[in-house]
């Protein structure tokens, strides 16, 4: 009728993807600004956009990917962050003294169970590729446990003791431990004891920062290193000593009794 005698198909623009436009992208972004945990179905129901289009907007237009949050022990406030920066700068100035690290006495505590179960990596065995998997009795962590308190310097252990089973470190308990630590320093580190140049580095646990503990340390002229709040990098026992000790005793059963505590608390270097 229009004089078109060609048998070839004409080019057509095709179906327009109207859902993925700037207005809908902004609507999806507004939903996420209110709740980043919203699911695709929830976003689709609130914006009246199909789930497929919402998914494409999230991935292609907004370049987003849903990730599980990482668990941390504590989220620092702005004041705590500023305090960490200030204390870390002070400690860096202290490190300029070549005797600073030599004067440090580091201490911390950790729970030790009567049985520390082996990790999966530790129980691997070489067997034939055609053999069945070896079997192992499932053992759970024993309820009986004791807390170990340890203090050491660059030369080795200065003081080590095990508390009675199930006893935790309170301010009163820690004050007694510090008294025994001072006696151990007097016997094993006479150079540090003579001029009272040793400095205790412990974390900000409640028993360490309690008022009675602080008062006892002032009365005995015990100096400490500034420890920024929630700074595991300044607690070497937590990421070096304790994990190593527990890896060596996994799968072994130890009796927890007072005689063990007495032997260990008076050991030398």
Image (cartoon, rainbow, N blue to C red):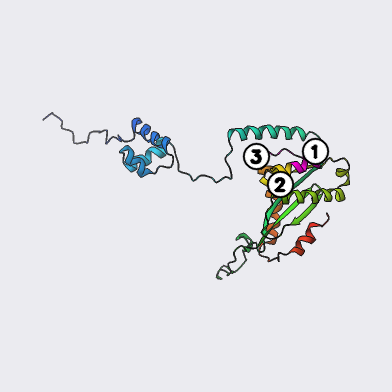
Label 3, on which residue?
229
Q: Tell me where residue 37 appears, x and y as whole percent.
A: 43, 42
Mark 3 Cα shell of 10 Å, populated few (<14), some (14-19), many (≥20): some
Label 1, on which residue?
100
At a point 59% along the width and 33% down the height, the residue shown is: 78
Q: Is residue 117 above or below residue 204?
A: below
Residue stretch rendered in magenta on the structure: 215-227
> Which secondary structure lies at badge 3?
loop
Instruction: Assess whether residue 220 is covered by the magenta stretch.
Output: yes
Q: Which numbered disc, 2 or 3, marks the residue closer to the eye?
A: 3
Mark 1 Cα shell of 10 Å, populated few (<14), some (14-19), many (≥20): some
Q: Tell me where residue 253 appears, x and y as whole percent.
A: 68, 66
Instruction: Assess whether residue 247 is covered by the magenta stretch.
Output: no
> Which secondary structure lies at badge 1?
helix
Determine whether label 2 and label 3 are within 8 Å by CB: no
At a point 77% along the width and 43% down the height, the residue shown is: 216
Task: Quadrant for residue 75, please give it.
Answer: top right
- How many marks overall? 3
Q: Earlier in the sequence, mark 2 or mark 3?
A: 3
The quadrant of the picture occupied by the N terminus is: top left
At a point 70% along the width and 55% down the height, the residue shown is: 244
Q: Earlier in the sequence, mark 1 or mark 3?
A: 1
Q: Is residue 186 left or right of residue 140?
A: right
Residue placed most toward the observer, 180 or 107: 180
Which residue is most to the left? 1
> Which secondary structure lies at badge 2?
helix
Q: Tell me where residue 79 appears, x and y as whole percent.
A: 61, 33
Q: Is residue 73 left or right of residue 239?
A: left
Q: Is residue 6 left or right of residue 227?
A: left
Cα distance in 3D space between marks 1 and 3 = 21 Å
Label 2, on which residue?
236
């Amino acid at each position: 009728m229009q004089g078109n005698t060609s048998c070839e198909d004409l080019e057509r623009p095709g179906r327009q993807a109207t859902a993925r436009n700037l207005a809908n992208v902004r609507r999806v972004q507004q939903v996420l600004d209110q709740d980043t945990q919203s699911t695709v179905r929830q976003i689709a129901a609130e914006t009246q956009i199909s789930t497929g289009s919402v998914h494409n907007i999230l991935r292609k237009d907004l370049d987003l990917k849903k990730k599980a949050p990482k668990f941390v022990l504590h989220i620092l406030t702005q004041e705590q962050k500023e305090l960490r920066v200030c204390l870390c700068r002070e400690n860096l100035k202290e490190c300029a003294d070549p005797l600073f690290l030599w004067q440090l006495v580091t201490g911390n505590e950790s729970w030790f169970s009567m049985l520390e179960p082996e990790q999966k990596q530790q129980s691997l065995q070489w067997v034939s590729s055609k053999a069945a998997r070896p079997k192992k009795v499932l053992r759970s962590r024993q309820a009986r446990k004791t807390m170990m308190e340890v203090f050491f310097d660059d030369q080795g252990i200065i003081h080590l003791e095990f508390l009675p089973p199930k006893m935790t470190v309170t301010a009163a308990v820690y004050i007694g431990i510090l008294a025994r630590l001072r006696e151990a320093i007097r016997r094993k580190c006479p150079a540090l004891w003579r001029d009272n140049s040793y400095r205790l580095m412990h974390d900000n646990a409640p028993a360490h920062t309690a008022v009675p503990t602080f008062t006892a340390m002032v009365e005995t002229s015990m100096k400490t290193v500034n420890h920024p709040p929630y700074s595991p990098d300044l607690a070497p026992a937590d990421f070096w000593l304790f994990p190593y000790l527990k890896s060596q005793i996994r799968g072994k059963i130890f009796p927890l009794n007072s005689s063990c505590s007495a032997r260990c608390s008076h050991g030398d270097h």
